[in-house]
Amino acid sequence: MPNSIDFPVLMCMLWAPRVELRVNKLLSERTYGLPEELCGALCGVGFDPSTGVSYDPDTDMELLFDSSVTAQDIELLNLLRYQVSQFFKAKHQHITSTPPQWTSIGSVSTSLRALVRRKTTVAAASANSDALKTTTLSKSPEGFPTPVFSQVTNDDNETKVTTLKNGLRVASQNKFGQFCTVGVVIDSGSRFEAKHFPGTSHFLEKMAYNSTVEFESKDSIMQVLEKYGGICDCQGSRDTMIYAASIHSKGLPSAVHLLSEAVLRPHLRADEVDFARQMIEFELEDLEMRPDPEPILFEMIHSAAYRSNTLGLPRFCNKESVNLIQPSDLFNYISTYHRPERMVVAGVGVDHQHLVDLAQQYFVEKQPIWTSSQDIASKLKSDNKADNSISQYTGGIKTVTKDLSNVSLGPTPMPELAHFVIGLESVSHQELDNFVPICVLNMLMGGGGSFSAGGPGKGMYTRLYTRVLNLYHWMFSATALNHSYQDSGLFCIQASAHPNQLRELVNVIISETVAMSQGVGAEELNRAKKQLKSMLLMNLEARPVMFEDIGRQVLSSGQRRPPQFFIDRIDKVTPDDIVRVAREMLRSRASVAGLGDLRQLPTLEEIESALQSKDGKIPKRFNLFR
C-alpha cells in the first residue's frame, strides 16, 4: 500500500455508496473567515430522507482525517468515483467492445495515481523532521502551505460609539476570543430615590431576569444562556444600574434580546416581588450577622457625608420599606430612569455595526412595556420626572453602638472590634486634574489587614502598613478608599481595633490623614504610580471589567478614554500635586462613621480640631474623678 497520509480513509470514501463530509467550524472562526477546514467524513449506505434514520447504522463509519484535505482532493476523489461508476455501469450493460473498458480503467488508474501522489507529497514533507528543525520561525518549511495570520489594526484597540435616533448610545471594542461581554449601563441607582421608596433599585436588582413579555419565566432566560455557555448578572450601585451577560459570540443576538427584555419589558409580577422581598429580608439579616461590616460602614459614611440627599440615600432597602414596595412603585421608577437617553449598550469582543443593528432592533423598534401595555401605563404617576439633583456634601457623624463580642464564634473566632471611618470630600471622576492625583494618593496610603502586614507582595510598603499596622500591634486593619461619582467624591480611611484602643486608633489615623498634606518622598510616589498603572492595566485584561469601564465612561462623558490617556496622566503626577489635593480635602468638613463599642470614640469636634492642627493629635481628656 502506498506511503500516503489518509490512504485507507480515501479508499473508504472511494467505495462507499454515500459520503458526508465533516467541517471544523470553530477552526474556521479562529482564522477570521478562511475556508472551513475539513476534518472527517461519514461513510455508509445512506439514510431515509423522510425520517433521517440510517439504512444500516452498523456499517456506517466515522472517519477522521490525519492531514489537511482540500477542495482539490475532493475534486479528484469525485472524479475517481465517477470513473469507477462509469466502468461498472458499462460492464453491467454487457458492452462487448473492449476499448471503452480499457479507457475507463486507464482513467481510474491515472486519477488514483494523481491523488496518491498529492497525499504522498504531503507525507514526505511532514516526515522531513530535519528540515523542520533547521527552518527558522520566520520562514515556512518546504512543502508546507504558507500560514495566514490575523492582522492587528488600530480598529482593534479603538472604542467606537454610535448614538441612535432615540438617544441610546452604543459603544463597543473588539477583542480576540470566542466569547463576548455585552450589557446595559443605566444612569440610575439609589441616589435617585428621593421621590421613591428607599431600596427601589435594590428590588430591581434582585428581580432582574425574571419573566418578561417574550420570556415566560427566569428558566426560559437561563435556557437561552446555557445554549451558548453564557451567564448574566445585574448590579446596582449609588449612581448606576448594570445589566450584563457574558456569552459565546454566536449567542450575541440572543444576549441583546434578553437584555432588552430585562431592562424594558419586565412583567414585575406580584409573586416575583414577594420572592424578591424574601431575598432582601434574608440579605439584611445576613448583613447584620456577618463578621465583616464593610457594606454597613460604607452606608454609614455616605449617610454622614451626604446627609439626606443623593449619595447619602440608603443603598440597601431598609426594614420599613421592604414590605411597602409594590409592582406599581417599580414601574414608576423604571419608566422614569430606564430611558434611552440615560442608557448605554456596551460590548467587548463584538463587531460594532452588528451590535448597533441589534440595539436598533431590540431597544428602538420594540416599545417598553409601560408604553405598549395600557394597563401598566394607566397606573403610572403623571408627574414622574427624573431627579437631577446635584449632591451636597454636608459632613457629620453617624454611629451605631452594637455588641460585636460574639459576631464570629467557632474554633477561631474574630476578636471584638470597634470600627472607625474618617471621610473627606474629594472630587468627581470628571475633574481629572485632581482625580488622578487622588487615585495615586489612595495607592500611596494603601493598607489592608494586620494578617498580611509583613508578607511579601502584600502592599507592605504603603504608608498604612509601614507607619500604622507595622508599628501598632493592636491595630487590626487600616485601609484607604476613594469613592468617585459624577459630581462629587469621598476619600476615606477605615480602621478597626479593640474597643479599648479606639481613642488611640482615631489619634493614629487622624495623624496619618494630616501627614498626607506634609509631603511625600520620591520613592514612595514612584512606587504608588507604578502600582496604580499595573492595577489599571491588569484589571482591563478581563472582558467584564473592560465592559464596565466602557459603559461608565460613555455614560458620564460620551466617550471612552483609552488606558494610555490615564497612564500619561499618572506619570505627570508630582509630589506637589499630592500635597495640593490633600490640603484641599482637609479644608472640607469631616465625615465620621463608628460601629461597635464606641465609649472611647472622640467627639466630631475633637476630630475636626485635630484635622486642622499641624500634628493631627487629639487633645487628651482630663477627668478629676479617675
Image (tube, rainbow, N blue to C red):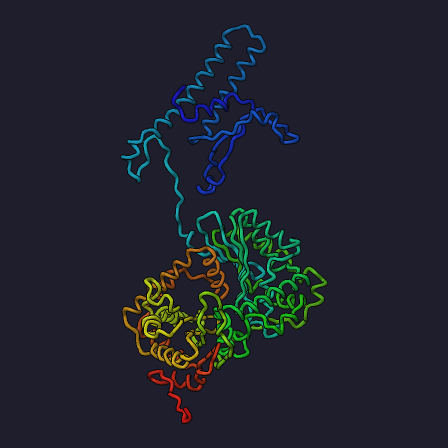
Which residue shows up at 53% across the image and 55% down it?
Answer: 245
Camera-nearest residue between 522 and 615:
615
Q: Position of residue 198 (x, y in %)?
A: 59, 72
Nearer to the camera, 329 or 76: 329
Q: Is residue 211 left or right of residue 568?
A: right
Q: Is residue 118 visible?
A: no
> Quick one: 366 or 193, which is closer to the camera?
193
Is 150 placed above or below 66 here?
A: below
Q: Is residue 219 above or below residue 324?
A: above
Q: Residue 72 location, x and y as percent?
A: 45, 27
Q: Quadrant of the N terminus?
A: top left
- Position of residue 464 relative to residue 624, above or below, is above
The x and y percentages for residue 427 are: 43, 74
Give the vertical position of 211 relative to 451 (above or below).
above
How many numbered discs?
0
Say whether residue 536 is left or right of residue 292. left
Q: Quadrant of the C terminus?
A: bottom left
Measured as percent of width and height from the top left, residue 175 is found at: 44, 51
Which residue is located at x 47 percent, y 16 percent?
108
